[in-house]
Amino acid sequence: MSKKLSKLNAQEDKELQMDMSPMIDMVFLLLVFFIVVSTPMIVKMDPEVKPAVAYNSKDPEDKRGRIVVNVRSDGSIFPVNIEDGEITDEDDITAYVKSLRDKYKNQGIASRLHLRGDKDAVFKHSRKVIKAAADAGVNEVLFSAYNFEQ
């Protein structure tokens, strides 16, 4: 064996180390990017509305573009932000739906009416909301219902 080779074999093995700081920086940059770019879909639920049970209900695949309107058991109609107060007039419902439809249209998203009706509400109140939404140009309606297992 040569002197050089025996000298190399006699030295202790040095551990290879990798600098992890660039990788950690990249992970945090990606995390911040996805948080900024993503748009959370939160549907506020009116605790006064108890939807009916449907045996064949299913969750819609696309949850974007929902215009949520709550119909309580006494027939009162509220927008998604209950703090905004009750909507009593059909023209007010149409204006509310139209404003959100225009907002979603500017984002390139098709809008749909998400009707959260109470199981004890008379259908004429829901029909009033559906007609007002149709007058605003929103023809697709999603009804909230609990699945039988829930």
Image (spheres, grey):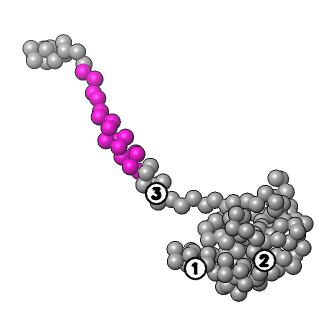
Give the residue type at disc 2: Thr
Give the residue type at disc 1: Asp
Task: Give 54 or 91, whichever is nearer the viewer.
Answer: 91
Q: Can residue 115 be seen in this view?
A: no
- The relative height of residue 15 versus residue 84 in the rendered view (above or below) is above
Residue appearing at x 67%, y 61% in the figure: 43
**Label 1 neighbour load within 10 Å: few <14, some 14-19, many 20+:** some
Q: Which mark is residue 102?
A: 1
Residue 140 sits in which quadrant? Answer: bottom right
Q: Where is residue 12 in the image (x, y as percent from the top left)?
A: 23, 15
Q: Distance between the residues labelled 2 and 1?
A: 22 Å
| Magenta stretch, residue numbers | 14-30
- From the viewer's perspective, is 34 left or right of 85? left
Q: Position of residue 142 (x, y in %)?
A: 74, 71
Nearer mark to the viewer, of 2 and 1: 2
**Label 3 neighbour load within 10 Å: few <14, some 14-19, many 20+:** few
Q: Which mark is residue 88?
A: 2
Q: Which mark is residue 36?
A: 3
Q: Residue 127 carries which label?
A: none
Q: Which of marks 3 and 2 is nearer the N terminus?
A: 3
Q: Earlier in the sequence, mark 2 or mark 1?
A: 2
SS category of the residue bearing label 1? helix
**Label 2 neighbour load within 10 Å: few <14, some 14-19, many 20+:** few
- From the viewer's perspective, is 41 left or right of 143? left
- The relative height of residue 18 versus residue 3 in the rendered view (above or below) is below
